[in-house]
Image (tube, rainbow, N blue to C red):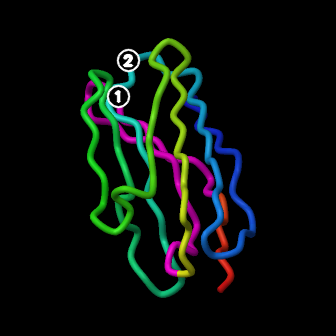
Amino acid sequence: QVQVVESGGGLVQAGGSLRLSCAVSRSPFSINVMGWYRQAPGKQRELVAVISSGGTINYADSVKDRFTISRDNAKNTVNLQMNNLKPEDTAVYYCNAQNLYGTSHWGQGTQVTVSS
């Protein structure tokens, strides 16, 4: 069974930084797209940033110029460096890995809380 394990997150003051990491293992197929989504209380899950195996990146407008996504294809890991955090970034952040057949796998989520 594919495992998606996140680490990082926590509580930080506005303007601070956090780094999220995610490792995918036991996938029988190549991982194509990896990325991060978030869900705030009472809101739908939304895309934060995704990166393809070829290095194509897509960011949500709300995090551009503040967040940076990176990945290691050989290790099936993806990181999200979050700088200049704002209270509206508070949410549960989920790692997602999509294989070449389009099957999606999710992590358990990690809480990010930004205090004002």
Is residue 97 shown in magenta?
A: yes
Could you say where residue 69 lies in the image, as x and y percent from the top left?
Answer: 44, 41
Q: Is residue 46 above or below residue 94?
A: below
Of the residues under marks 1 and 2, which one precedes in the sequence? 2
The answer to whether 39 appears left or right of 20 in the picture is left
Q: Which residues are magenta?
A: 88-109
Of the pair 70 and 91, the residue shown nearer to us: 70
Of the pair 50 and 115, the residue shown nearer to us: 115
- Amino acid carrying label 2: it is Ser
- Amino acid carrying label 1: it is Asn
**In which quadrant will I find the C terminus?**
bottom right
Please tell me how crowded label 2 is: few (under 14), some (14-19), or many (20+) other residues with Cα within 10 Å: some
The answer to whether 88 appears left or right of 62 in the picture is right
Q: Which residue is mark 2?
A: 30
Residue found at x 40% / y 69%? 45
Query: Quadrant of residue 84 in the image?
Result: bottom right
Q: How many numbered marks appear?
A: 2
Question: CA–CA distance between discs 1 and 2?
Answer: 6 Å
Q: Which residue is mark 1?
A: 99
Residue found at x 74% / y 63%? 10
The answer to whether 99 appears left or right of 106 in the picture is left
